[in-house]
Amino acid sequence: MTHPLFAKHQSTLERALQTAEQRGYWSAYPEMPSPRAYGETAAADGEAAFKAHLGKSFTLDQPGVGTVGREVSPYGIELNIQYPGFATETLLSAANQARKAWSLASPDTWVGVSLEILARLNAHSFEIAHSVMHTTGQAFMMAFQAGGPHAQDRGLEAVAYAWNELRRVPATAYWEKPQGKNPPLAMEKRYTIVPRGIALVLGCCTFPTWNGYPGLFASLATGNAVIVKPHPGAILPLAITVKIAREVLAEAGFDPNVVMLAATNPNDGEIVQKLALHPDVRVIDFTGSTRNGDWLEQNAHQAHVFTEKAGVNQIVIDSTDDLKGMARNIAFSLALYASQMCTAPQNIYIPRSGIRTPEGTVPFDEVAQAIAASVQKLCGDPAKAVEILGAIQNEGIAARIDEARALGKPVVLDSQTLVHPVYPDARIRTPLLLQLDANTDEAIFTREWFGPIAFVIATDGTQQSMPLAGRIAAEHGALTLSAYTTDAQVADAAHEASVQGNVALSLNLTGGVFVNQSAAFSDFHGTGGNPAANASLTDAAFVANRFRVVQSRRHVPARSTADTPPNA
Amino acid sequence: MTHPLFAKHQSTLERALQTAEQRGYWSAYPEMPSPRAYGETAAADGEAAFKAHLGKSFTLDQPGVGTVGREVSPYGIELNIQYPGFATETLLSAANQARKAWSLASPDTWVGVSLEILARLNAHSFEIAHSVMHTTGQAFMMAFQAGGPHAQDRGLEAVAYAWNELRRVPATAYWEKPQGKNPPLAMEKRYTIVPRGIALVLGCCTFPTWNGYPGLFASLATGNAVIVKPHPGAILPLAITVKIAREVLAEAGFDPNVVMLAATNPNDGEIVQKLALHPDVRVIDFTGSTRNGDWLEQNAHQAHVFTEKAGVNQIVIDSTDDLKGMARNIAFSLALYASQMCTAPQNIYIPRSGIRTPEGTVPFDEVAQAIAASVQKLCGDPAKAVEILGAIQNEGIAARIDEARALGKPVVLDSQTLVHPVYPDARIRTPLLLQLDANTDEAIFTREWFGPIAFVIATDGTQQSMPLAGRIAAEHGALTLSAYTTDAQVADAAHEASVQGNVALSLNLTGGVFVNQSAAFSDFHGTGGNPAANASLTDAAFVANRFRVVQSRRHVPARSTADTPPNA
């Protein structure tokens, strides 16, 4: 008999599996924060629940030592939330205790409990949205969608992939080997799924749930205990997540310490290293800097390490039949959450001789200006602009704008500081657009300039731009590549560059889809094949190593007699 | 249209997929070296083909520098085979050139070519059997079965798992997202399988083909180029394999350098390190010592590293209703290829108070003597014994017997030197059986004593033996665990120990199945969950990381109109 929570969510799971196989559009969780989808009081209840956290101790009934918590809202409101601190050995010891019964539960139990947690998270989408907004700086709509339903979709996707691997292993098998004139050898074999142990999720400060849920749910659905260590700048969204997971686990009869929070204050490098190298930690999911990700890959040998790190996303402009649409689309990609997205474009290559359009060749400067003008238009009205730009997550990102200005390169569009109509202390910046040259500035544009900083880069032509984009993706990492062309041969070259760089390609986006966006069940986020990530969200490789299969075999009476094998 | 070689072998592939899913018995390649299966002249032809290699240069039309080759037959015949040497950069450059067209071929092409290579290898089973025999020391029957059809089955299994992952990724998808009253967003998406690059297979000297084929075929069937570096002591079986692979590749229109041989002389550590750390090498499959395997895991960060290393295989004896059958079965496991198998048992735990049997309690000494007597019986007639024992692969293994004797522990059965009736210079040894104590000798029996060395270990009872076995497997690695008991609760405890140690369990083997044996499509060889191996042969985790998926997306006209989504 399958677990009741599995049965409860089975149709959702089946639909997720089917969609992931066909890779069309589907979402399990409504992306519009509407009363029709979430209930008449959901918005107010969620906001109230968020406000109730402010200035309080966040209660989690897990072993703790002291308190931590120094989150700062990019919108300038006072957070002052305290979380339980922890001692590494105590935390791991509790996780080890909790995982005993959990690891012996069945795959349908792991999956059923995971799906119930996702459903509860969905019901808390408004509370999570406010918590994402006030830790990451995302505008409310994005915080709701990317932090709520889209993150939940990514979690569901991981559960579906996990289930797809788990269900491939039969519980038992009958094995019968013919022996010619002698009776066949017959055995019964049992196959037991054995989770790896304790998994560690290391969150980031810009997309704590969207980037955290795939690893969390892939590990949980394969029977592991999970310790969630949020970025010290964005604890609340994952603390709420952990609290809900623990409630569901307890209701299902498990020790809630199967999922625990490891909250820290800033400058937690030493604590993270200690956790990450502990022999009991067997799986690590990391989102963050290349330096930290590389360190994990090269030092946490006891664990299987999945990383998403920095990269350089690029747009190659060759030609277009819709200059306005192109400029508008690119501008939105640059403005969205002030480019604080791992998928946001940074390098925009334009032939110095201009690009072909139905209206004739448009010079380099005009193309650059078209993009700049579109950005300016999006940012013209601060009240509307802040709903796209959001706020800058931390002072380091704001300082990077100054660092870029100090390069002394021609400024195509300067970054502006806007005043938020509701939050006067919010840290709002519009994109900075600098002009570079492909032949002389490679040292600048092969770095990731995380935040609202982009470069229009003059090239000798598409024949230079395209291989350059492929090579930079391969050497420096990238999660997205975008290309604009009306020429089928150039489209083929873009495909070649994407294959060379192991990077997802978007062609001629001029409408309502943006290169930053990655849809669960359809778009693979990251390929795992360039330095920006060693894994893809989500494929079989992302889940298949999170458990092992232990078999046992013993003789049983043969069902066939000599010389009449059953499989003949 | 699928590739003709895919179509040719499709039914074999389908059967492999089905068997791997149900995990019953099946073999694609006949394990009996009979004229009915292989043709009237196959045995003679194969032997002649083997003899034709002796004293000659093994011709491979690949870029080479000088010659290497110092293989020594454990049976004492002169080999004197010369292979092309190589320069690392030249070899990798040729592989990079060759992999261009290969990586752009389709999954069904990679799989079809791989299956054709396996079919050709099967037709060369006799030639390969002699080459395995005279490099590894295996007796002819084992060399034929394990080196030929069983190795080919393992290769086919890897191809089947690879295909199962490859076919899950659709070539294209239609994605349509409803936009309420506005027209839906519609995109066409393409998904391209991108192989990792160059794969390196590092072979061992005891099962060059059985342990080499899974990695070789998993990488090849996912579109990678493969460099096969055999152990310097067992080059010929893999050289023949590479030659056949290159012939098939060339016939299929590909650059044969997609598969290349990297033969070396003994003490090739520096060469291997250089190869293994090269940035172009993206996948490594290794079978060998823990020291070398750990080094690869901890240093070859640019590659995905699959290892099979040393371990301590164990038998827990609690009780039995067939003492004779048990003793005979264990004795055969110890004698088979003189325990030069990664799956051969080493530690045999017996309660010092004796074991329960239908005839009453049998004392420790009698159980130990029953096993010793059965070994002696198997080895009594040298002519018959050598067909089980084979020869000792190298002098180091023979020396280890002396090292074990020098421990000064009670000798239950001494190792003997036998004279082979056909090969007077063959290095033949029978198993050495020492008596140890669980409470005082752990430092001895937690080491792997590779070769014909085993320990009967007195324990305080099964309640000590079982957790000890589980812990040793978890801490020191193991590929097999065997237990004998008539008690259902003890069988449960054995299951727990196997789960704790992440090791495959065999219960009450008293007949024609031996713990050393691992059947393709049914038995997972290694779990990947203890120090003996970081991967399992074969599961999804073994293949899923050998390629990446690169997608591209572009807008297309929507098939639906506003408010009428196709998936509604």
Image: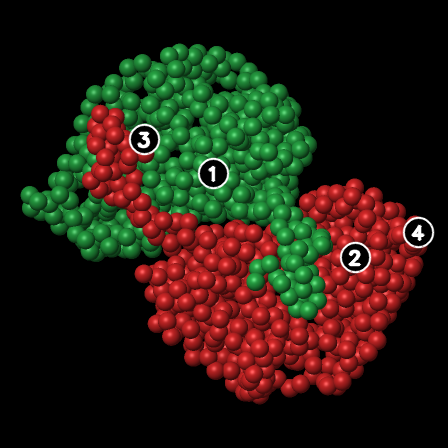
Chain colours: A green, B red
At label 2, counting other C-alpha atoms closer than 10 Å, the crowd grade (few under 14, some 14-19, many 20 or more) is: many
At label 4, counting other C-alpha atoms closer than 10 Å, the crowd grade (few under 14, some 14-19, many 20 or more) is: few
Res B360 label:
4
Disc 1 from disc 3: Cα separation: 21 Å
Disc 2 from disc 4: Cα separation: 24 Å
Q: Which of marks 3 and 2 is nearer the N terminus?
A: 2
Q: Which residue is drawn at 48% across and 74% down?
A: B120
State the residue position of label 2.
Answer: B347
Q: Is mark 1 on a helix, strand or loop?
A: helix
Q: Which of marks 4 and 1 is in front?
A: 4
At label 3, counting other C-alpha atoms closer than 10 Å, the crowd grade (few under 14, some 14-19, many 20 or more) is: few
Hey, what amino acid is under mark 1?
A: Ala
Q: Residue at x 61, y 77 (%)?
A: B34
Q: Nearer the viewer, mark 2 or mark 4?
A: 4
Disc 3 from disc 4: Cα separation: 71 Å
Disc 4 from disc 1: Cα separation: 53 Å
In percent of width and height, residue A171 lies at: 61, 45
State the residue position of label 3.
Answer: B568
Q: Are marks 1 and 2 on the same chain?
A: no
Horizontally, residue B44 falls left or right of residue A11, namely right
State the residue position of label 1.
Answer: A160
Q: Is mark 3 on a helix, strand or loop?
A: loop
Q: What element carries label 4?
A: strand
Task: Say which of B406 and B34 sits in front.
Answer: B34
Disc 3 from disc 2: Cα separation: 62 Å
> Badge 2 sits on which subunit?
B
Circles 4 and 1: CB atoms closer than 8 Å: no
Task: Say which of A293 and A220 sits in front.
Answer: A220
Horizontally, residue A14 falls left or right of residue A460, namely right
Hey, what amino acid is under mark 3?
A: Ala
Q: Which of marks 2 and 4 is nearer the N terminus?
A: 2
